Image: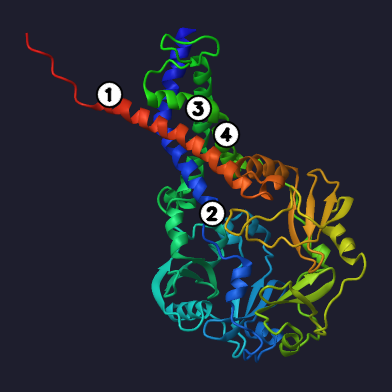
Amino acid sequence: MAHVKRWLFLIHRWLGVLLCAFFAMWFVSGMVMMYVGYPKLTPAERLEHLPALRAAPVVLEPAQALAAARLQGPLQDLRLAVAGAGRPVYLATPAQTDPAAQGKSRRMRQPRAVVIDAETGAVLARVGEAQALASAAAYAGPDVATRYEGQLDEDAFTHSRALDAHRPLHRVRLGDAQDTVVYVSGRTGEVVRDATRSERLWNYAGAWIHWLYPLRGNVFDAYWADIVNGLSILGIAVTLLGAVVGVLRWRFAGRYKSGRRTPYPGAMMRWHHATGLVFAAITLTWIFSGLMSMNPWRIFDSGAAPLRLESMHGGPLTLPERPATAQALLAAAPADVRELRWTRTAGHTLVQALAPGHAPMLLDAATARAHHWQSGELEAAARRLLPDPVARMETLHAYDSHYYSRAAHTMSGGADKPLPVLRVVFADAEASWVHVDPHTGAVLGRIDGHRRLSRWLFGMLHSWDWLPLLSRRPLWDGVMIALSLGGAALSLTAVVIGWRRLRRRLGPRAAPARP
């Protein structure tokens, strides 16, 4: 038994020397991430910075623009907005029709948007420095200087896979008070990300280091996920071993000769022993849930068949035979409209008129009149999303454990989570739930049993996304900071102990005395 204990102590000691440095980094950077997230451009921010559309010189109708670009067939997306220095453009994304593309990389699968000048019909072949500067200037507003900083594929603030369809990116620095850097799509000319000086600086102590992003965009990129998973698994092992060692060395009944319950004479060892007993559980929980965030070995992928969106929508997105003119749609839209987006939902071709601070205004694409759903129309369409029967439908008027909103800077925040929302519960093998916006008819997302498990093992255990606690801030902040400080103390004491031990072992040894 003594031999086994000795091996437990040795394994925990030397693995801990390396890994507790990562633990301390994760705890400290996690506290930063509570308030400053990885840079992103939310839909609301993007809309706010788009120039007004109503006064833009839109000459071509959507059908004329598509014909000028020689785009035929169904579309995945069609938008009208102002790009660059006040020029209106149509952004048309062809529907993905190649089944073989499903096996390709994620970056290759995403169809590219075609940018068509709404005045001349010219197709934007490439985005150069002038176009990038014009887009950045339109984003920044009047009297803000811009400075071009070059073209790049990826940097410290653009590792997100959501940007893959826009690479290469143009980096432009704005002369505003926040020293903002914006990234312009090399495909569409749109600003797709912004990062203020404060966000950039805090990220080096927050998300950038927390997610081990120094290993992204270089020779380690292909191994990044394996490295994160491997460190997490080793971290779990070290924490479990430490908990076992801590319990074995603690005198629950009686005391050591020193009068203490811990055998260690040094203050640092005593602090490490005590904090380990108190905070080992939360350390283990956060390392395990961090591993779950990586979806290791794709354990949360159910392999469920995709939703039949075309069946729900009554076919792919195409323009009506006699569409309403762009000017008619703009006249019917709110005065501050920034973008028109054509959609296909429940057998209707519609146009969403988007303005900052307002829910999308829904217009009929053929008549430009306001569109209103008939009773039960969306519900009947949603039933066609899967071939399986619907177990129940319910309308949520408040957030719950599986449909809720977080602050925009957080990992899961920033997306539109409107209320009320329609939840369609299917009786399929994967126990799928689909959320549908009853205002626009848009499918907001699908979660099956695997994803609901991920929500608990990651969202709940890692970020404490528990509504009764989230709704009682700053209680949530206090709990998270207290536990993080405890975990950091456990880790930092281990780092100090390990450094002292290494220094003794690797330091110069005294020369033997001469006889």
Q: Nearer the viewer, residue 64 or 410?
A: 410
Identify whether 90 is placed above or below 277: below
Closer to the chain start, of discs 1 and 2, is: 2
**Residue 164 locus on image (x, y percent):** 54, 62
Disc sitting over residue 505 in the figure: 1
Say whether marks 4 and 3 touch (CB < 8 Å): no
Against 332, is 225 above or below? above
Q: Look at the picture and state if 495 lies above or below 510.
A: below
Where is mark 3, residue-wise?
276
Q: Are marks 4 and 1 in contact (CB under 8 Å)?
A: no
Q: Which residue is mark 2?
A: 35
For the residue labelled by badge 4, is the local secondary structure a helix, a strand or a loop?
helix
Q: Earlier in the sequence, mark 4 or mark 1?
A: 4
Instruction: Report which quarter residue 133 is drawn in.
Output: bottom left
Query: Real-space Cα distance between discs 3 and 1?
Result: 25 Å
Amino acid type for the residue under numbered disc 3:
Gly
For badge 2, the amino acid type reads: Tyr
Task: Out of 390 and 352, give the one closest to the viewer.
Answer: 352
Q: Which mark is residue 282?
A: 4
